[in-house]
Amino acid sequence: MRNSWKHSVQAAMDKSDLSRLERKIQQAEVAIFQRIDAFSSAYDGEEEALFEALRKIRELANQLTPIQS
């Protein structure tokens, strides 16, 4: 499914169930990387959207588990 990664990202961005947030973040990351891995040679702008989504998911994950000094 080409857009399943978008659904995973949207689910992770919905912070209404914090007990499942870490799992949602992991699922979104996996979905994004699977889509990147499945890329065809055609570029339709999705690549940029994937990397932007990955950036947002990483920001969310960093808020969940701050880096300890």
Image (spheres, grey):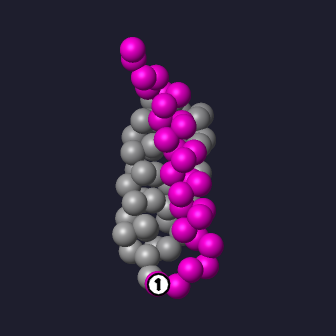
Look at the numbered disc 1 and give the secondary structure of its residue. loop
Let me know if residue 9 appears in the view: no
* Residue topped by disc 1: 41
Q: Identify which residue, 61 or 6, lies in the foreground.
A: 61
Image location (x, y in percent) of residue 65: 44, 25
Q: How many marks?
A: 1
Image location (x, y in percent) of residue 4: 50, 65
> Where 27 sits versus 65, above or below?
below
Image location (x, y in percent) of residue 69: 39, 14
Q: Residue at x 58, y 35 (%)?
A: 15
> Where 60 sits versus 10, above or below?
above
Q: Residue at x 54, y 36 (%)?
A: 60
Q: Identify which residue, 23 or 42, lies in the foreground.
A: 42
Q: Residue at x 56, y 53 (%)?
A: 53
Q: Identify which residue, 7 or 47, lies in the foreground.
A: 47
The span picked out in magenta is 41-69
Image location (x, y in percent) of residue 32: 45, 59
Q: Amino acid at mark 1?
A: Ser
| Chief secondary structure of the magenta portion | helix
